[in-house]
Image (cartoon, rainbow, N blue to C red):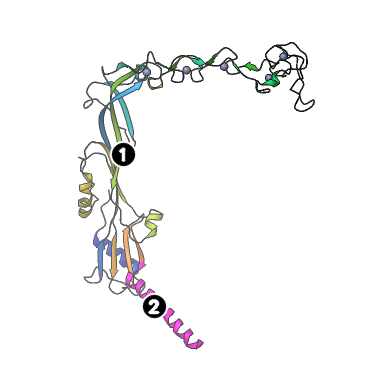
Amino acid sequence: MAEAPSEEEMLKAVERHVSRPGAAAHLTVPGAAALSWQSVLECRIVRSVERRTERPMRVKGRRGAIAGRPTYTDLDTHPVTPPDDPGTARRVELVREGSPAEEPCGDCVDGKRECPGCAGRGGSRCARYVECDVCQGGPDACWECDGTGHPRTRRARPHRPRTEGAQERAPCKRCRRPDVACPKCLGERQLKCPACAGTGRAVCGTCKGAKRLRHEKCGGAGLFTVWTEGVITHTPAPDGIKPVYPPLTRLRADGAGRWHTAVLSSPSEELPEFLEDVQAKRIAPLLAETEGEVRRRVELRCLPLARVVVRTDPDRVYYAFPGAAGIEVIGRPSRQRLTALAWAAVAVAALVAVVSLTLLR
Ligand SMILES: [Zn+2]
Ligand SMILES: [Zn+2]
Ligand SMILES: [Zn+2]
Ligand SMILES: [Zn+2]
Ligand SMILES: [Zn+2]
């Protein structure tokens, strides 16, 4: 891997950048330029953190649900390969050898319980007959016998149709006279109960007469399966540092610069040579092995970068860094210069205001 350019090489590059024909700059002369290193460091870390936990399990029904699941005897030593990519989350559920058992439900008989709607009777008693809803079981049931079957004597009939011709009258089933009876009950005053169809027994709407219902809590199996479950999880844990970039959009936008890169995958691995001492010190605490860590990926990217201020040119700042073809130099207005420009703009605005006010007066 290429070594970082020296301070002198950086200054020489800036020198070439600022020199004009007939006005050669000499920046390596003491006091001619100030250089500070502002190398960019990117450090992205992702660890795979393993956790092992045991918990009691209880599900309804027979143990078919856990048949074929991998088993373990000692969770702490059970071998499990962590995911190749530490950024992948994974969860393994295991069954402790010998732990599965079936427990009776206790709240039902063979998975069934007495119907709460009918207390296990399948239905309830019901009146066989109901009053006729046309004649209300009253004297209109039959004008001859009032529904008794015994016709009146020859005295005047008290009942007449309420509205002439409003209702067809039917022959009475009781007294056998034509055209005198209620057309619905035919003189009988009552009708078969529609709920029980005259049987005197209504079927329970909850169990439809079955008397017992499936016990949902145990899934109708009448038992539960219990076991000890071991869970091994691998969870990605990201970490890293927030890179500080120089005010050069090119560096981030088109990825300019020849960056040093390295990928570390173990806590024992040496840090790459290209890191400056301050950078190595900064990231070292982040790279310590953490509890439960089983995999890691540390991506390091570094661009050596120098900030150079030329004494004779205080309005600009120069950034030098290794590029595709030698050291690249980019000049930017200095903050001092930007502040001065901002003040100039404020001054111009103030002047315009004063002038306009004077003219308007
Ligand atoms: Zn049950
Ligand atoms: Zn019922
Ligand atoms: Zn009924
Ligand atoms: Zn009658
Ligand atoms: Zn009737």
Name the front one of labels 1 and 2. Answer: 1
Q: What range is drawn magenta here?
A: 332-361
Q: Amino acid at mark 1?
A: Pro
Query: Of the residues under marks 1 and 2, which one precedes in the sequence?
Result: 1
Q: Residue at x 25, y 52 (%)?
A: 3
Q: Position of residue 127 (x, y in %)?
A: 56, 16
Tell me if residue 96 comes above or below residue 337 in the rendering. Answer: above
Where on the picture, by quarter, is residue 12? bottom left
Could you tell me how far apart the alpha carbons at marks 1 and 2 are, in whole angstroms?
A: 53 Å
Label pair 1/2, CB-CB below 8 angstroms: no
Q: Secondary structure at mark 2?
A: helix
Ligand 1, by image quadrant, is top left
- Between residue 29 and residue 302, name the one nearer to us: 302
* Residue occupied by mark 1: 236
Specify whether 205 is left or right of 14: right
User: Which numbered circle lies on residue 344?
Assistant: 2
